[in-house]
Amino acid sequence: MSYSRFAIYYLPPEGPLADFGAAWLGWDVARGREGHPPDLPGLHDITMTPRKYGFHGTLKPPFRLIDTQRVEDLTKAVSDLAARLSPAVCDGLVLRTLGGFLALAPTGDMQALQRIADACVCDLDGFRAPASDTELARRRAAGLSARQEALLAQWGYPYVLEEFQFHLTLSGRLAQADISLWVERVQQYLPDLPASFCVNQIALCGERADGRFEMIHRYTLAG
């Protein structure tokens, strides 16, 4: 299959959490197929933005492959990177509101997880085509700090390195008045969250012709 963009994600392993995320968002990124969302009024609308990406934690944001590189080269580079990286263990996952949207976020020491994300951003950047003027303008419309602007110019995305905050998105931006309702609804369907959250694999994902991302391959961190 041909992909228009690629990304490096953390995808939860098979199990209750992955099943919940695929159902809640209505898209199973690991299997590349529709999910089966619960019958909740408004759920389709609030998950419209994150649905195309599936339930994931971003490590290297979506990018177009530069003309001088091949998909096979990218695949090998991701495999080699995973072989060098060590797993990261955080205290657990909690449901949070981040910038008006709902997400699961880890707690505890983030240094090892930050190291994984930094390596994905920096070590694979030779495969990223420069961001287009349209992409840059869209990012800048959110209102960026000077540091975020510098990161956007260098890495094609403003929320990397020290601006990075790992999370698994569960909704688009919500009206303030609706947040408590959707927190309650999420909690009704969430499985038991892990007391220890381990990132021990990374996944190369691609954007299909229909605009949705699917997993190409999952790599175990073996460093």
Image: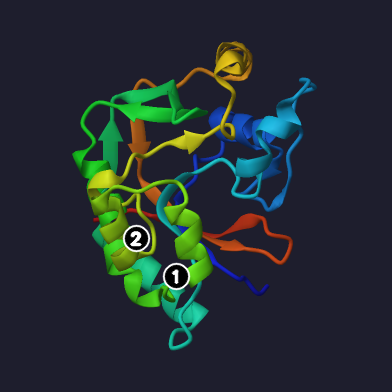
Q: Say which residue appears at 46% left-offset and 51% top-offset.
A: 9
Q: CA distance from mark 1 to mark 2?
A: 9 Å
Q: Is residue 152 left or right of residue 47?
A: left
In the rendered image, residue 120, in percent from the top left (x then y), is placed at: 33, 59
Q: Amino acid at mark 2?
A: Leu
Query: Above or below — where is 157 with respect to 144?
Result: below
Q: Are marks 1 and 2 in contact (CB under 8 Å)?
A: yes
Whether residue 203 is visible? no
| Residue bearing mark 2 | 152
In the rendered image, residue 102, in percent from the top left (x then y), is placed at: 52, 27
In the rendered image, residue 22, in percent from the top left (x then y), is placed at: 65, 37
| Residue bearing mark 1 | 131
Q: Say which residue appears at 34% left-offset and 60% top-offset.
A: 152
Q: Say which residue appears at 67% left-offset and 64% top-offset.
A: 208
- In which quadrant of the rendered view does residue 107 lie? top left
Query: Above or below — where is 166 with respect to 205?
Result: above
